[in-house]
Amino acid sequence: MQLRRFQEGDAPALYQVYFSAVHTIAARDYTPEQVFAWAPVECDMDLWAERMRTIKPFVVERQGCILGYADVQPSGYINHFFVSGTCPRQGVGRLLMQRIHQEAGALGLAELTADVSATAEPFFAHHGFAVLERRKPVRRGVELHNAFMRKMLLNT
């Protein structure tokens, strides 16, 4: 597996990872209505591409196939963290989390935070994040549930 920065042209593949993660992996913790509100079949690819350019994620690929992506913002907020539903539990998430921690160290961050799905919460907890608040965001008129999590970093 290779880890690299987002490149122009990655956006459609990243949406497929996002869609697959939500519809395959997260679907065990969310209703079909919630899943489709969170990751709809139809996507404005121009808006999605702009969002990816803005967050500048790290991308994991194997043999030219994108398997996952995640970002960390200068504030320490992890905006997106998704692994394709075709390859869960194969080390993609671990690789992304390691890279996020490296970037946090390079930026001198004191903490990492994220709004984490019920599905991803155990993974984030395993990596030292703790729940600060339970939240109920609304997407396309449908209430979801997640947790705002934080990890304090030692190397500041």
Image (spheres, rainbow, N blue to C red):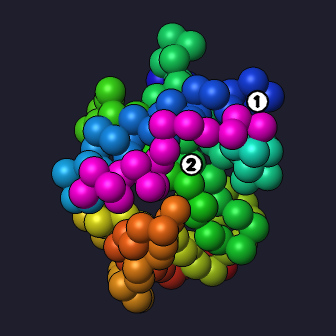
**Callout 1 secondary element:** loop
Residues in magenta, as a range: 31-46
Which residue is found at the position 19% from the left and 51% from the top?
A: 28
Image location of residue 97, percent across then percent down: 48, 52
Image location of residue 48, percent across then percent down: 69, 43
Which of marks 2 and 1 precedes in the sequence? Answer: 1
Image location of residue 58, percent across then percent down: 63, 42
Q: Are marks 1 and 2 in contact (CB under 8 Å)?
A: no
Number of numbered markers: 2
In the displayed structure, does residue 79 sit left or right of residue 7? left
Instruction: Name the amino acid, label 2.
Output: Ala
Q: Is residue 68 visible?
A: no
Q: In the depicted view, which residue is nearer to us: 134 or 127?
A: 134
Q: Is residue 18 visible?
A: yes
Image location of residue 114, percent across then percent down: 51, 70
In the displayed structure, does residue 3 sit left or right of residue 74? left
Which residue is found at the position 53% from the left and 25% from the top?
A: 66
139 is higher (above) or lower (below) than 40: below
Q: In the depicted view, which residue is nearer to us: 18 or 45?
A: 45
Q: Which mark is residue 7?
A: 1
